[in-house]
Amino acid sequence: MKVVKQLLGNSNFEHMPDVVNQSNRIPGAEDICKVREIIAPYIHKTPVLTSQTFNQMLGASLYFKCENFQKGGAFKFRGATHAVMTLGDEDATRGVCTHSSGNHAQALALAARMRGVKAHIVMPENAPQIKVDAVKGYGGEITFCMPTLQAREATLQKVMVKTGAVEIHPYNDYRIIAGQATSCAELVEEVKDLDMVIAPVGGGGLLSGTILSARYFAPGVKVLAAEPLQANDAWQSFQSKTFIPSQNPATIADGLRTSLGSLTLPIILDGVEDILTASEESIVYSMKLIWERMKIVVEPSGVLPLAVMFENMDLFVGKRIGLILSGGNIDLFRLPWLEDTSFSKR
Amino acid sequence: MKVVKQLLGNSNFEHMPDVVNQSNRIPGAEDICKVREIIAPYIHKTPVLTSQTFNQMLGASLYFKCENFQKGGAFKFRGATHAVMTLGDEDATRGVCTHSSGNHAQALALAARMRGVKAHIVMPENAPQIKVDAVKGYGGEITFCMPTLQAREATLQKVMVKTGAVEIHPYNDYRIIAGQATSCAELVEEVKDLDMVIAPVGGGGLLSGTILSARYFAPGVKVLAAEPLQANDAWQSFQSKTFIPSQNPATIADGLRTSLGSLTLPIILDGVEDILTASEESIVYSMKLIWERMKIVVEPSGVLPLAVMFENMDLFVGKRIGLILSGGNIDLFRLPWLEDTSFSKR
């Protein structure tokens, strides 16, 4: 982990998300095996689907790991379940908390309910009603705040002081990373001889876990990351080998707008083969095509692996590719191909 | 088959669709086993999904047989494949034909392409572009006609005279019924101790096949049919024990607008436990809920089994229910919850 040490001296780190509640080292192979056992009674072992249509379109063999079928509708439930189920009893009585307007909020609320502990979720007051309803549906206690990162962090601090709840960060936490790693671990166990696995990258929890599982359980399988061109902070970080924060990215892929974390960046720089980007148009095109041809609901962030394949077809011809479809939570009243007339002819 | 004999004297039969290209008897258990072998290399063995959400909402154990994941996007490919693959070589050289604006057209075109024979499809000139494109995409040769049943039948006759192609009727054909029967055969093989199986009913091919497979392979499992209230000709036929044709039904479930056939009606009257209906509102509600919670794309006709469960919850409490989700072909630009504002608050 040479890169890790280099980065520890990088002044940009002061702008990165704080490390909270982490175990103190990068999860090893045995750790991830143990996590699989811990979360097995709670999660879905998600299916791997194939599609002749996409195989023919891309001249490759694609294996779609369907985390959109995960409980809570996204891979996030894996990490959240691991974090919640391994809390000490005393911590558990105080409950858990996070700030999130996305899938982590739902996942944490659901995992907490399964253990019978409270989940305090700080959400921006402009969060989509559908996400507010989902968190409430899982029994989460919501505190609303102004829609700025500063307000979210300040409000979360207040909630922690008041309740004593334990913060569970969405990605910058080795317990979370180890949980997300279980998706790729299942994939490479089920599908042998993959050439590559492609995972979307936002905060980097899923990508870090994917890198670790590929390294431990399928050495030789390359891991690529997929990122919206309009939120290409991870790509910039990868190119510059330093932390570049995400700044108000304008992408439909709402799960991929966040910056990398101090724990995820080193793992990514050390282990990712490349980071590929996709245009907003490719994202929407790929999403609609997956719905039409595979008959499954995948959210914009979840189709990034397919979208980067369409934009880089030469890289993948003749290869066996695992794609992690990270989630399927979307407001069915706001489908992107209905909101942008430039897609209406596709 | 007492009912069959009674019905043969029923004068209404003259209005029923003609029997074409049928083998001469109701498929038996061995026939259906043989069909499974014949079509196995071509079809998907579709998955059976479960959902805690729906189990909790309905107080029952639901097993969703996902024919929306079938090739061509619907169960229709099973029967079409059986009919096409068992054609004599001489018949095959002349190709196959049908009139259909729906899933059967796509299924037949795809099955014909797999055998390397021509498929002539008569479609009404107002058929949705998405369905025209799908048939073309599978290599079907389309002849357009006026959008009336009379014009469709007359045009098909002309095509048959000109090409010598063999007509493959969408449901009134024992080869088709035996093919559709394989879905329920797979379901009851995979999920033991079901109390009931619910299938949608349009022309009755899927329902007839479901009845036969339940009878042969899981005796004691009751088969229920699900039909739109606004296209309740099968329900009327069941109540009156005679053939009542479908007359310009106004339902969003476009696959279920057809009348029963002379081969399907007797099997249905003899073997269906009950026919339940669902309102248009229930259909759209169930459809959106399946998409949101199960992350799968199911067309309106396909959600009828769930919709009738919501309208008759008392019947199913504590039971183990198989639901055949018949297909997933839908224009993603025309989603029903976006077209009817009365659903916008759900």
Image (tube, coloured by chain):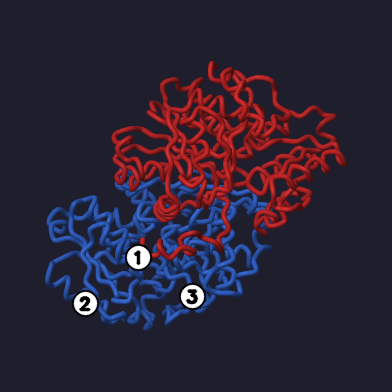
Chain colours: A blue, B red
Name the image quarter holding residue A58: bottom right
Residue A293 image offset from top left, x and y in percent: 59, 53
Name the image quarter holding residue B14: top right
Nearer the camera: disc 1 or disc 3: 1
Amino acid type indicated by mark 3 = Thr
Query: Is A339 rendered above or below residue A151?
Result: above
Residue B164 image offset from top left, x and y in percent: 85, 36
Q: Residues within 10 Å of mark 1 (few under 14, many from 20)?
A: few
The residue lying at 35 percent from left, 77 percent from top is A16
Q: Residues within 10 Å of mark 3 (few under 14, many from 20)?
A: some
Badges 1 and 3, same chain:
yes
Residue underneath mark 2 = A155
> What is the residue that sits farthest to the front in this orientation?
B11
Left or right for B195, reference B231: left
The mark that comes first in sequence, 2 or 1, is 1
Residue underneath mark 3 = A251
Nearer the camera: disc 2 or disc 1: 1
Left or right for A257, reference B256: left
Q: Residues within 10 Å of mark 2 (few under 14, many from 20)?
A: many
The residue lying at 48 percent from left, 72 percent from top is A252
The local secondary structure at tag 1 comes to helix
Give the alpha-carbon distance from disc 2 to disc 1, as whole Å: 22 Å
Left or right for B266, reference B287: right
Amino acid type indicated by mark 2 = Thr
Location of the N terminus of chain B by quadrant is: top right
Residue underneath mark 1 = A130
Viewer-closest of B172 and B116: B172
Chain letter of disc 3?
Answer: A
